[in-house]
Amino acid sequence: MTAQIEIIDVQKHYGSFHALRDINLTIPKGQFVALVGPSGCGKSTLLRSIAGLESISGGTMRIAGEVVNDMPPRKRDLAMVFQSYALYPHMNVRDNLTYALRLKRIPRAERHAKADEVAKVIGLEALLDRYPRELSGGQRQRVAMGRAIIREPKAFLFDEPLSNLDAALRVKMRKEVRALHDRIGATSVYVTHDQIEAMTMADHVVVLRAGVIEQQGRPMELYDRPANRFVAGFIGSPAMNFVPAVTGTDGRSVTLEMTSNARLPMDIQIAEGRPVTAGLRPEHLEICAPDPEDGMTITVGAIERTGSSCYLFSEEAPEIIIVTDGATGVQQGERIGLRIRPERVHLFDRDSTVSLRG
Amino acid sequence: MTRLIRSLRDGIGFDTLLIILALFYLFVFAGLPLIYNVIISFQRVDVFSLGTLWHPNVGFENYERVFNDPLARRVLINTLIFTIGSVALQFTLGFAAALFFHQRFPGATWFRGLFLAGWIMPGLVVGVLWNWLLSGDFGVINHVLKSMGWIDSAIFWRSDTAWSLYAVMMANVWYGMPFNMILLSVGLAAIPDDLYEAAELDGANAWQRFWTITLPMMRSTIGAVLALGVIFTLQQFDLFAAITQGGPAGSSTVAQYWSWELSFREFDFGRGAVISVMMIVVVLFVSLIYVRSTRAETRL
Amino acid sequence: MSAAWTNRLLFVIALVLAGIYLFPLYWMYVTSLKTQSSIFAVPPEFLPGVPQWQNYALIWDVANIPRYMWNSLVIATGVTAFTLIFGAGAAYVLARYRNPWIDVTLFLVLMLQVLPPSLMVTPIFVGFASVGLLDYPRFGAILAISAKTMPFFIILCRAAFMTVPRELEEAALVDGNSRAGAFFMIVLPLARNGILVAALLIFMQGFGEYVYSASLIADNRLHPASIGMTNFLQPNVVNWNAIMAFAATYVTPIVAAFVLLQRQIVNGLTAGALK
């Protein structure tokens, strides 16, 4: 049955390389957690440590309350969906689905009944006698999912399972995987480098960088309250604009170090004269008439239209991206003013990059 | 104890067990003989002292006797001629064949594969076949050479001291050529077509493309093939046994055959071991070159 | 010249080259079917006359063919079994990891591959004699030959194991296999073709082996066919039709296996030989 996973102070070393550092993470029963971060951040290592495919160098890992540090994968009762799907090429779909059951010595008739049942859930009834090489990418993906579902494991582990699909299918499968989770309610750990996948699918998102958890929380929490500049830049697309700034003498405003030296009022009190980095989400910037006094003013450089929306790039450094309505009439070379609500301005300490919003 | 069993079932113990199985076997049946070889090269080992593990020590006597043997010079020269001649011819013919079959006409791969039929044959049978082909009075080779007008009277390949070594060499080139060809074909296939296309656009003709693209790109393959050629040629024994048996009068005796003859014809295992020790050093040196060039290959 | 004509020309040249190269094999079969007088005909008869099949029947008992072939079979089977049992696992481990220890082991294996049997046989013979292994000469020969074939087998097999994705084995572990279970149920079946080709090559080597058998086996009743041929050669040195019939009987199984599996053998060799 589905279970809680606790990860306490976990470390992983490869020789002198510290791959995971003080990882603390509790995944309650039935939760869908996404591990996200750039490549080499340790997200896959963490997942493989949970699976038991990598041994951890320190700390404690518990599944359903039981310490599993030295437990081999076969005893952990977890199911894993691999990036390449890892379907056994010498077995047909039915045997692939039931391989784990066969290892548990469940009688053949029962196994086959279960395979039929699961095939119905994932829509593969017609393909049970096919071999993996005869399936399309999407079908293989489903078999890999089915192989996990059939076991009713303590938890599902996903290692970038959608990254080998084309864009359209990926969006579709994203919804299907989440729907499946809602129906089964199994604890799931999902590794991805795609922050949109993490945001749209997970209950709880864990952002990793260089073996360290930078921040974890509900998706919108990470979007609204990024703990530091890295998370702020990683979550959200297009990425947040970062502009060097200094807090004003009143402590209630910041002056952006841009060509226009714009002053933005703040909704919080900050020590005066402090060097900071202001973070402005492209979708939070609103276009207004240029204010020559102390408003933000830019010259529009490149324009990218996607139809539904329009990306404007400032000509001056630091480059600012603005996402605006697709029907905007702004022209290249035009000078425009920008406006942002004070509570939407993110401020990060320039040295430590930690958010000043606490 | 439970830890060990657990590691064998689920951990690195399983890998360790598998690798130790092979390494232990190789240590007992290849490593120990290598060491023992050096030891007995300093001992007097004959039919009477065979049954014991330790034999009377004679210092460098075996070495002296080998070096002072009137045959030693002949054997050294023969080994050099046989090795260099075989490798050069195998390589040239193999490379030519590899280039020919690289033309990708229908059936090229299949024809190329046919040549391996020679390589998979037992060496001794190859030797016996060539023994018959090279027969002095009724051999086909003499007949062909005569009807081509290249020779006037039959060459007694196996019994003429001037020809016996070359008789074995001929058989060895036939035997080893396919392997050279296959390895060189693999190297040729690894060169991307667009390199040739780019060179052609740059105005290089076929000859220039061969010298400026093919050869430089094949460098590590060629190194490996030449080293393997030397190694396999130094392993060649069966052809000597089947064609000339080192004779006549030692005219076709090479080091590896002499070593065996001293041990198993004259039952002087100490002297056999001396040659064996020296030749193994040579072989290991050559294989160092081989391993290094294959390393370069895989790192590309 | 059009491409089609170039291809046709190249095809004809290939045919001629293959014909020249394979002539010794052809000559073996033709000679084996000739009469005693026609083998010494001048000029030689390149096409067989009336095939003298009785040449084969005549040597069958005279030359003790069944006994020699049986011994060759026993040695080849033993060598293949030892090589497979001791070598396959090591090949798998060497394919699975990439670290300095593996590099060193691989280096050692490559180095052992090159030792000439005719040089190794002296210490092996003396060693076997002193520990009494020469009392079981065929077994001793199998042990010695396996040490020679194993490095080559490991190199070829490793290439076969490299083609099995690591994730499949991991999936099996997560699905509930022990390491051995995953090895036997997933990895081994998937690497099967490459291993079989390698094993076949080893079998052929064992079947044709000469040096170790000739040096370690004294009893003629235990000699394989390679020694049988040399024994037969000396007293019958003018009966080339009989000798060629012996040779043909000996190599036809090997040639047949090669013709059937040519593509797989070439592929296996090219995959493993240089890596």
Image (tube, coloured by chain):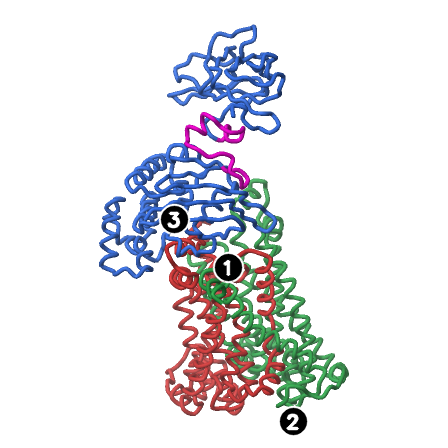
Chain colours: A blue, B green, C red
The chain holding disc 3 is A
Query: In what element is the residue under mark 3?
Result: loop
Observer able to see residue C263: no
Q: Is residue B274 visible?
A: yes
Expressed as whole percent of the image width and height from the top left, the position of residue B32 reads 62, 76
Q: Which residue position is annotated with label 3? A: A64
Q: Which mark is residue C95?
A: 1
Front residue (pair C9, B291): B291
Q: CA distance from mark 2 to mark 3?
A: 74 Å
Q: Residue at x 60, y 66 (%)?
A: C108
**Residue C216 in the image: above or below residue B83:** below
Start-end of magenta stretch: A208-234
Q: Classify 10 Å Cα crowding around label 2: few (below 14), some (14-19), many (20 and above).
A: few
Callout 1 and callout 3 share a chain = no
The kind of residue on which mark 3 rests is Ala
Compared with A49, C118 (above or below) is below
Q: Nearer the viewer, mark 2 or mark 3?
A: 3
